[in-house]
Image: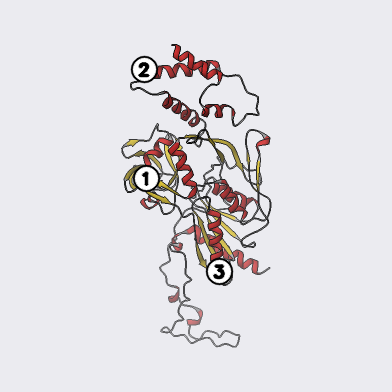
Amino acid sequence: MKRRFDLARLLILGLIPGALLILASGAFAEEPKPPLPIQELRAFAEIFGRIKENYVEPVDDKSLLEYAIRGMLAGLDPHSSYLNEEEFADLQAGTSGEFGGLGIEVGHEDGFVKVISPIDDTPAQRAGVKAGDLIIRLDEKPVKGMSLEEAVSLMRGKPGTEVILTIAREGEEKPLRITVVRDIIKVASVKGRMLEEGFAYVRLSHFQARTTDDMLKKISQLKAESKDGIRGLVLDLRNNPGGILNGAVSISDAFLTDGIVVYTQGRNEESRLDFNAAPDDVLDGAPIVVLVNGGSASASEIVAGALQDHRRAIIMGSQTFGKGSVQTIIPVSKTAAVKLTTARYFTPSGRSIQGEGIKPDIVLSDAKLTRNETDESTRIKEADLAGHLENGNGNAAPEADPARHTPPAPKVARVPDIEDDYQLSEALNLLKGISIYNSWN
């Protein structure tokens, strides 16, 4: 019993590991400190002692305290967590653009692991994992009751090895079993091409430290490819799970000339941070359509919200994920850190992204286009009718000759599969309409 009393006394005096000290007083030190909850700390010490004495396997003090920290953070919200040495290194690698795993951004929902978004050109996407999938088993282990960190740890492993994901997917009568081969994930976060002359397409799959530089290089390259420059841009943020805040701010800033991009607000008024745009626009005011969906989260929502509030872009697609909270990484030693939710994101007009997401200006379902079987070149036109009137401008119309139809105009080169992508096709059509309208003024 003396051991348990000594631990309780140490807890009450504040002589506890550094991680707990930081959590207790580091982030909100300016607020008046409430008295320590003595009874609850005694209960904690009692439970700690019971586990040490009665658990079926011996457990060391360090492990028990780490479990306590993890549980304390997991109880706050889905995004706060404790990062040990391996997890801290993985986080740093993820923001640099190279890390090991399956290639999915995940969160917690009803005790299961929810896929926020598969990352482009990764094993998970190629295997058919989709945004919104609920992972209920990893190999043969049920996910229910696991912490998010435990589930992520099971998904990581040696490149070339397999993991079987059992997935519950909306619209499917029974769970799906998808085998994914682990690999080193090297995320190329920016892709782009010309859709048609003057109309560019840029996809951002993730926000990393180098994403802005890569996007600016891509836009410069596309400008050089087009003899008329860029008259309109489709910025594709669908299934982009987010990334670092600075990336979202600088991407937005590339298209804005002034004003707030986003601001964060914590518990105190003094905690507000404003992020402002510099006076330049890489597209010189050319219209933008931003594509989003339910897999667009966090940094993607910051960009969409900023461009929407400044009326710099038309947002098209479906409502975004709604992850509008700020996580601060607080190192607690040379090898460990705490990821703690410390504030919320707000768009320039003061809208909170958290739990709401960004509502598109034009709502479009995720549909597919199919080409009409009728060939336009076989349709009968006025000029094909015998005895039709001439043009009237002094130009004689060609004689009707069924064997001598004018061939259809050559098709403009398109992005592969653009004809199957309804949202992208509509975005391009909208940009064309805006361009025509602007040419009238």
Residue 439 horizontal side relative to residue 78, left or right: right
- For the residues labelled 1 and 3, the Cα–Cα distance comes to 46 Å
Name the residue: 49% across, 28% down.
Answer: 72
Compared to residue 405, the image places residue 60 above or below, namely above
Name the residue: 57% across, 87% down.
Answer: 395
Name the residue: 52% across, 44% down.
Answer: 321
Residue denoted by label 1: 172
- Residue 170, x across and y down, in percent: 41, 44
Residue 160 horizontal side relative to residue 98, left or right: left
Label 1 is placed on what type of residue? Glu
Quick check: can you spot residue 82?
yes
Task: Rate crowding at label 1 as few (under 14), some (14 to 19) or many (20 or more) other CA atoms within 10 Å.
Answer: few
Label 2 is placed on what type of residue? Asn
SS assignment at label 3: helix
Q: Nearer the viewer, residue 353 or 170?
A: 353
Q: Nearer the viewer, residue 58 or 266?
A: 58
Mark toward the start of the polypeptide (2 vs 1): 2
Q: Quadrant of the N terminus?
A: top left
- Residue 303, x across and y down, in percent: 58, 50
